[in-house]
Amino acid sequence: MTAPLALLLDFDGTLVPTARTPDGVAVDEELRALIAAACERLEGRLAIISGRSLEQLDGLWGRALWSVTVAASHGLELRHDAHRRVPPPAEIFARLARTTEARFGAAQGVVVELKSYGLGLHYRLAPRLREPVKAWAEECAAAHDLVIQEGDMVYELRLPGADKGDAVHTIMALAPFQGSTPLYIGDDFTDIPAIAAARALGGRGLAVGARIAAHADGVLTSPAAVLEGIRALAAGGRDAFFT
Ligand SMILES: [Mg+2]
């Protein structure tokens, strides 16, 4: 018996045409309904894997993704079963920002830059603190499994290399995805590791447009063609994307 299908989808450039600005993308009711129908047809084995943050995606989709597994920020954020399985990374960095402020204090010239998924420790105003700042960054990195990226008078703490390939492996280990065959669809360079992961798990990857066609098992010409395939799948055709 053939393993059931899991559908793993990039968002920008795959389900919607890429816009001139990130804010220029819109999700209409038809797309919301289509994803809901396909997700139901696949008994929950549908996931969106995007470089956008969960907050951005929810802003575009409304509540439509609440019942869909979502890996956002290239896999740094995961929501499954309506629960965030990974604590928002920002919480880690916000906490480290506070402890760093307490340790060095603005008066000493270390500027702490809190980012969504990172923390910059700038010592430009106090170059003599380079070594203590470095030691502190190493202590934080070791305690929280972070990596250090050195920049121009800054040590930045970041999460270790999550990519869409990691997201595919993480999602495929979850119920109800476990044991199914993944089909990944994406259009950009960041989708290449996801296609490789889908293949490693016995599945396939399709490219939307020409950009990463050489890395995929097949090509869909446009987001409209992707939606057509999903529509056929939702209507009952398992082979929608394979013919
Ligand atoms: Mg894309």
Image (spheres, helix red, strand yellow):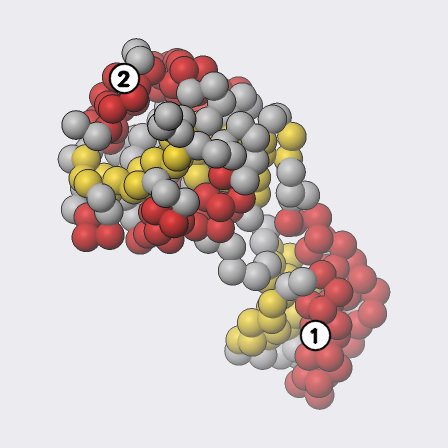
Q: Amino acid at mark 1?
A: Glu
Q: Amino acid at mark 2?
A: Gly
Q: Is mark 1 within 8 Å of ligand 1?
A: no
| Distance (Cα) linking label 1 and label 2 | 53 Å
Residue 110 seen in render: no
211 and 61: which one is in front? 211
Local secondary structure at mark 1: helix
Q: Is mark 2 within 8 Å of ligand 1?
A: no
- Residue at x 33% of width, y 15% of height: 234
Q: Which mark is residue 138?
A: 1
Q: Is residue 165 above or below residue 19?
A: below
Q: Which mark is residue 237?
A: 2
Dividing the picture into quadrants, the one containing residue 20 is top left
**Dot 2, how many residues are within 10 Å of its Cα: few (below 14), some (14-19), or many (20+)?**
few
Direction from residue 78 to residue 10 in the image, left or right: left
Which quadrant of the figure contains the C terminus? top left
x and y percentages locating residue 222 in the rendered image: 19, 33
Direction from residue 242 to residue 6 in the image, left or right: right
**Residue lying furthest top in this view?**
235
In primary-sequence order, the first of circles 1 and 2 is 1
- Residue at x 24% of width, y 52% of height: 215
x and y percentages locating residue 138 in the rendered image: 70, 74
